[in-house]
Amino acid sequence: RKEVEQDPGPFNVPEGATVAFNCTYSNSASQSFFWYRQDCRKEPKLLMSVYSSGNEDGRFTAQLNRASQYISLLIRDSKLSDSATYLCVVTGNDYKLSFGAGTTVTVRA
Amino acid sequence: DADVTQTPRNRITKTGKRIMLECSQTKGHDRMYWYRQDPGLGLQLIYYSFDVKDINKGEISDGYSVSRQAQAKFSLSLESAIPNQTALYFCATSAYGGGSDTQYFGPGTRLTVL
């Protein structure tokens, strides 16, 4: 079983729509959680950390459910520039990151 | 200028050749990492180094070796390249400091082994 699993998508949404997707992780001892964004053939970049109480950054909202071992990302008022692959990332107490394969989002005009 | 640079950006080579991928960073970070990315798979950790004297194997180190020449430089070598090492390779850095440190990635090296 993969340590981090994501629905690969693609999620095709119109501009202005809300899109949400989850990621599950297998290690109950995982300590830190992140969403990274990766544009086609480019390097991943940190989008946001995910905190236990949930957190927002502009149009992006991340949630963590430790009991069910999943994190989620919600994008409101989608923009064309939000089209990317979103990588779910989890760390254990050794500070090494485990990456999901990514969820692809395509926002259409 | 980019904080994390990788050379070369693209490389095509033949089976059995020795290849070195280089990574340099100006962020002053102690920790450096090498990952590979294959279509449909998450990034997989090849090797990581928490300081110049510390080298550790990741989940897929077979067929690879590394050298940490200085705090700012971390090289990945394929001693005898094989076709299933065709992938996108990323170097990353992070600062020391807890489990929430952000990793900063280089632009990647696209390696094709024929």
Image (spheres, helix red, strand yellow):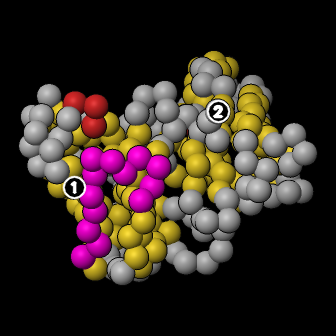
- Quadrant in which the C terminus of chain A appears: top right
Q: Is residue A59 visible?
A: no
Q: Which residue is mark 1?
A: B77
Residue at 49% x, 27% y is B40
Lateral position of residue A104 relative to residue A78, left or right:
left
Lateral position of residue B45 relative to residue B80, left or right:
right
Residue at 74% x, 37% y is A24
Determine the residue located farthest toward the front in the rendered image: B62
> Magenta stretch: residue B66 in it?
yes
**Label 2 is placed on what type of residue?**
Arg
User: Which label number is shown at residue B11?
Assistant: none
CA distance for labels 1 and 2: 29 Å
Provide residue B102's location: percent of width, then percent of height.
57, 64
- Quadrant in which the N terminus of chain A appears: top right
Lateral position of residue A22 relative to residue A83, left or right:
right
Provide residue A77's location: percent of width, then percent of height.
74, 34
**Label 1 is placed on what type of residue?**
Ser
Which region of the structure is painted magenta? B57-69
